[in-house]
Image (cartoon, rainbow, N blue to C red):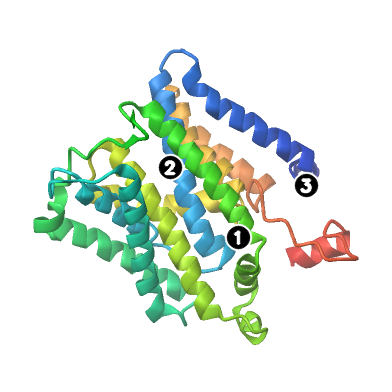
Amino acid sequence: MMKNNSSFLKNILDQKAFRTVLSALISVIILSIPLFNFPQQNLWIRIIGYAGLYIILGLGLLVHVGLAGMFDLGFAAFYAIGAYTCAFLASPHFDLHLPFLAVILIAGALAALIGTLICIPVLKLRGDYLGIVTLGFGEIVRMLLMNLTDITNGSQGIIQIDKPTIFGINFNNSTYFYYFIFALIALLLFLLNRIIHSRTGRAWLAMREDEDVAQMSGIDTSKYKLLAFAIGAFIGGLGGAIFASWQGSIFPDNFNMNVSINILCVIILGGLGNHFGVILGAMALIALPDILRGFSDYRMIIFGLLLIIMMILRPQGFLPRKAPQFEGKSSSSPDHEKEVQS
């Protein structure tokens, strides 16, 4: 019975028409939330907007883990670098007040630069070993933010971060951040979709499946690793800058190891390797616990049961990566499905 239900659910979710309708429905719901007045509207904008922030971070980590196959457990470090760069350049802390668009690009570029420098000495590491190194990097960044009090203000954090002004629009409430976040998500999804279907994307997928075979096939794995780390870190830096400017204050504890684990869970839950699955993963993992807050006594039990049921019925995530289609042989054939699953 359980197997039949799982097969039925898989067939529905694999249908292109269903995915298109579901994507359109989610988009309409997300865009319409700020347009209608209803009880606790501001709370819902914060919840869905915060989930949108995790979608951005999830897309960055997806480049590392889901596409290039580099196990990263310290992605919160790039998130922190972007946030503190924004705080340094747009607050009274150093008495700098640069325009937001310049700040967010600088934050992303600095995170990408540091990500590239970190990747260079660990190019030969794979799997768990790379995960341990990135985990250590994340904790080193957090400890530096705690202890470099002359620069970061330590555990007291940085406050009074400037609110953005873009094209004369002052982001004085959460609605502006809400739409900016989802506009950036749409842009990132478009760009990642183009990259995935390019030569770079195919090289990343080849590295993820088998790095040795990819290297023997003529792929410069070192170059594509550095590129993947830089792009993923850049996206993480963008997310950090948005978070800092939206919250108006940041502290080292905002970027602990739990943040990295949550981002990793988002891309696994959504479907490892599928950039559209990150949206469903973030909504389920980040927004759902807050949506269930009305059931304060049972919300974590309900949330845990939903995750268990989902992992039983859909162990590869909501939207797992579709197998590539080869000329003369459809990826939907039973033999090919068995080959991919094995």
Amino acid carrying mark 2 in the image: Leu
Helix, strand or loop status at disc 3: helix
Using residue 74 as the reference point, say whether residue 87 is left or right of it: left
* Residue 335 occupies quadrant: bottom right
Residue 127 shows up from this direction:
no
Depth check, front residue: 157 or 27: 27
Q: Residue 29: image x %, image y %?
A: 58, 26
Image quarter of the N terminus: top right
Quote the CA–CA distance across marks 1 and 2.
Answer: 21 Å
Image quarter of the C terminus: bottom right
Q: Nearer the viewer, mark 2 or mark 3?
A: 2
Q: Farthest residue toward the bottom?
A: 216
Mark 1 or mark 2, earlier in chain: 2
Residue 230 lies, with reference to residue 152, above or below; the image says below
Q: Residue at x 41, y 37 (%)?
A: 50
Residue 167 shows up from this direction:
yes
Q: Residue 274: image x %, image y %?
A: 62, 53
Res 3 label:
3
Res 53 label:
2
Mark 1 or mark 3, earlier in chain: 3
Residue 188 lies, with reference to residue 43, above or below; the image says below
Which residue position holds label 1? 195
Helix, strand or loop status at disc 2: helix
